[in-house]
Amino acid sequence: MAERDKATDGTRHVLVLNQHGDNRGDEAAFRAMFAGIAERASGPVRFTVLHQFAGGRVDVRVSHDVRWISLVPTPLEAARISAYAALLALGIRARALLGPWGRSVIDAYEGADVALSAPGGPYFGDPYAGHELVHWFYVWLAHRHRLPTMLYAPSVGPFRKRALNPVRRRLFPRFRAIAVREEVSLGYLRALLRGRGPEPVLAMDSALQRPIPPAERASYFTGERTALAHRFLVGVSAIQWSFPGHPDPAGAHARYESALVDALLHVHRERSAHFLLVPQLYGMRHSDVPYLRALAARLPADVSWELVDPAADSDHQQRVFGMCDMYVASRYHPQVFAINAAVPGICIHYQHKALGFIERFGLGRLAFPIDALDRARLLAAVDEVLERRDALSEGIARALPGMRAASARSSELAVALLEGARR
């Protein structure tokens, strides 16, 4: 839709940038973002997502009006949009330079009312420094097309790679609104910007604004599996982390994996648990399934476990974590799924986003850095969860209404931007 159509079309148009593909956690964040904005807007809303699903295949079912445009151009298309951008920087819109893909992307910018840089990340920060400029490019395009733009509750930082900081300091302040999902990111951003640009808002992970009821055990475990409904259920999601920058990545991974297996065995010895292994990555190129199977192969034969259907969507995964008694996760969003149902557990964090999230609930003592796992402290934390599970769950439940309100704050900011853009 071209820019001239905005005045006559009553449906508001939200352009979503920097989507993270093939991950059920980001799928949950997207679904909640779509719902949160659509429910609060004064009229109908449609979305266009510039996506990066591997192979260009979108496997996300949503109930809203969403169009998906792949961000995987051919080399020729990439060259043509780069030439277009070079002239756009001089104030010249040379659409004739664009190919079919480039025109579809630029049409999305010209037909949008606002642009949101999607929940996820930290795309803007050192962990993604290798392709951070690509993400800034799509934000810059929004600025050049005079679109009100918002950073919608990702994590950001750290910003120690100084070569990128001039770009960061130039483009962050051009957001009309900035929301981040945890205090660590808030601190990184304030230190970088030093008062320039809009004051960042402390929100919460997008997925929390959309609670999903737990699965009923009696319905989940049927037939020959009925007895499992009465077991101590543990949701498990593990990342095969590469330990970038570590002097001994292979050794660090071996220590992490041993500690993770020890934690699971400790739960099994104390509670005769049944483990539900939940893969987060999916799609044509990414999958957690091989690693989860390899992890399960390290468990003794008498340990009960199953792999949750890799094709199951994020709603299903949230229902699974919600029916568990505890969780053990070294991926970020599985702990969000569990906490969203007031299920306590153990967080092993590889980036500050997970630590920042769990600390919001006062449970930082149950979180451990993946590259410095202390087995004794980890098992002591497991014991605390096992012994004080009901009290921990009650504490999480008391905090959840405030955290859901913080999560919804991002949608409120986006809608305010959207409504203001049409006046």
Image (spheres, rainbow, N blue to C red):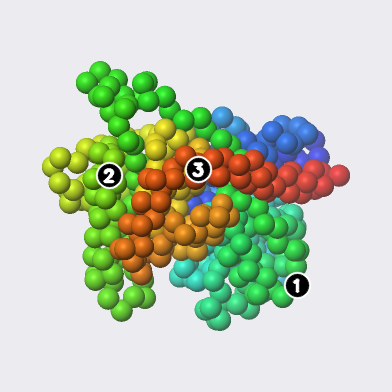
| Residue 409 percent across, percent down from the top left | 70, 47
- The residue carrying pointer 3 sits among few (fewer than 14), some (14 to 19) or many (20 or more) residues within 10 Å by Cα, namely few
Task: Find disc 3 in the rendering and name its residue.
Answer: 391
Q: Position of residue 7 (x, y in %)?
A: 81, 40
Residue 194 found in image quarter: bottom right
Q: Left or right: where does residue 75 sit relative to residue 42?
A: left
Say what secondary structure mark 1 lies in: loop
- Which of the pair 101/313 is nearer the observer? 313
In this view of the protein, which residue sits in the foreground, 393 or 253? Answer: 393
Q: Disc 2 residue type? A: Glu
Q: In this rendering, is residue 101 above or below 183?
A: above
Nearer the observer, 279 or 136: 279
> Which residue matches tag 2?
270
| Cα distance in 3D space between marks 2 and 3 | 18 Å
Residue that protrudes farthest toward the front in the picture? 387
Q: Circle 1 sits on which residue?
A: 195
User: Is residue 110 shown left or right of residue 354?
Assistant: right
Residue beneath the point at 72% across and 65% down: 174
Q: Is residue 255 above or below residue 70?
A: below
Image quarter in which the C terminus is found: top right
Closer mark to the observer between disc 3 and disc 1: 3
Judge the density around disc 2: few (<14), some (14-19), many (≥20) Cα neighbours within 10 Å.
few
